Image (cartoon, helix red, strand yellow):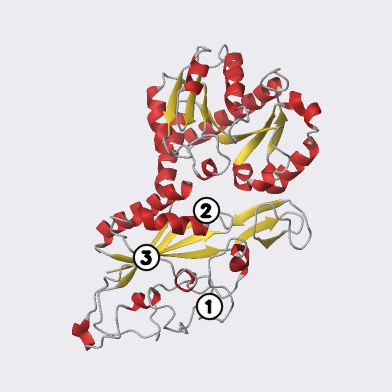
Amino acid sequence: MCTVCGCSEGTPATEGAKAQADHKHTHHDHAHHHHDHDHHHDHDHDHAGDGSHHHHGHGDHHHHDHDAHSHDHAHEDAGRVDCGANPAGLKIAGMSSERIVQVERDILGKNNAIAADNRARFLADDLLVFNLVSSPGAGKTSLLVRTVSDLKGSHAVGVIEGDQQTSNDAERIRATGVPAIQINTGKGCHLDAAMVSDAYRRLPSLKGGILFIENVGNLVCPAAFDLGEACKIVVFSTTEGEDKPLKYPDMFAASSLMLINKIDLAPVLDFDLAQTVEYARRVNPKIGVLTVSARTGEGLSAFYAWIRKQSAHLCRSGIEAKAT
Amino acid sequence: MHEMALCEGIIQIVEEEARRQSFSRVKAVCVEIGALSHVAPDAIKFCFEAVAARTIAKGAVLEIVELPGAAWCMACSRSVEIKQRYEPCPSCGSYQLQVTAGEEMRVKELEVD
């Protein structure tokens, strides 16, 4: 039982996770509800100040003897956790050198800074950059092979391929005569901005052209990482099930365009296009939708028209950037 | 597990702040995680302990403050609270929502020695 409020939760639960999220008490749940941390109790007992062994550093009260203490200290408003509050709510003079330092920094700040550098470099090179994301097997590479083959005559085109292992995808792209750099993320589940920065340096000049970044096949993690692209394109295939946008909403929210691939298979799959689009727009009302088939080429001219439209948009933003 | 990468980001921030603000031990790390952000609080807690080992934040407690999600409902022309991205406006049922808050992933403050 929770010793703060007397509610029945107190063991980690999967199904109950939602209940916990709705639980309005917002106490320090790390301490009260998760007693399984292996804390090293190597805190300094600073006896010099008052000689009382009861007063360890105030933070320590949160971290041990949960069953023995009743944590009835005042919890501040739900939007704030005071890491430094002691159980009695008192400041003890001369107690220790503990302090709270304000940080207020974005966890992805470093990635975002590198992504901003990438974006500036792409703009300077007058380059249109797309970050293609999807689950594994949606057909990103097949789509890219076809796309770069069709566009290479009219644009400088390059590809950065991300996979955990193998350079199979880059080899497929290079077979079309288009330069490609493979990034193997090893255990990594997504590309980050630093990887793209490094890979971009290894590509020949693509000035005025188009760079496609094929992210690791994963509908979760790549959503969080800005690479410096103009926009994300999520490739969804008709074999995947209409409710995927609801199951993986972050990715569909982060993408500007949903390319529904393998549309040639739709008749045999009883694929419900309208339902898919409706779900995607629940998550992202502004997402563009195009249906294509990398195999038959159906719908690709509309995709290329969309790319040209983005290109015109990039031109405008480039002019605006130079003007400011 | 991009939570691993996010935890590495947290530790990097902690180590930079340690140099900048001169402290040698971190007892607690407070992070703010929005309800609509790309991270599951339980997963990040799980990863944090592993990533923090052998760093200045070894043994530190990760405190997670969950921030609510909010969106601007275009139909109602007002701000509404949402818990998930695919939720409709709680008052009119429209999905024409523009997320305005809840995507935060921020290190807020540290309790240090």
Give the residue pinned by disc 1.
Answer: A2
Distance, label 2 to label 1, CA atoms, is: 25 Å
Q: Chain of mark 3?
A: A
* In the rendered image, the vertical position of residue A105 relative to residue A159, given as above or below: below
Residue A303 x/y as whole percent: 67, 25
Q: Which mark is residue B39?
A: 2
Residue A12 x/y as whole percent: 53, 65
Q: Quadrant of the N terminus of chain A?
A: bottom right
* In the rendered image, the vertical position of residue A164 relative to residue A56, given as above or below: above
Picture quadrant where residue B16 is located: bottom left
Q: Chain of mark 2?
A: B
**Label 3 Cα crowd, 10 Å radius (few <14 / some 14-19 / many 20+):** few
State the SS at label 2.
loop
> Is residue A239 visible in this depiction of the protein?
yes
Residue at horizontal 58%, vertical 40%? Answer: A219
Looking at numbered disc 3 in the image, what kind of residue is underneath it? Answer: Asp
Looking at numbered disc 2 in the image, what kind of residue is underneath it? Answer: Val
State the SS at label 1.
loop
Q: Furthest residue to the left?
A: A48
Residue at horizontal 44%, vertical 80%? Answer: A67
Residue at horizontal 78%, vertical 31%? Answer: A269
User: Image check: A98 left or right of A209?
Assistant: left
Nearest the viewer among A168 and A248 is A168
- In front of the other: label 2 or label 3? 3
Distance, label 1 to label 3, CA atoms, is: 19 Å
Q: Are marks 1 and 3 in contact (CB under 8 Å)?
A: no
- In front of the other: label 2 or label 1? 1
Q: Are marks 2 and 3 on the same chain?
A: no
Give the residue pinned by disc 3.
Answer: A38
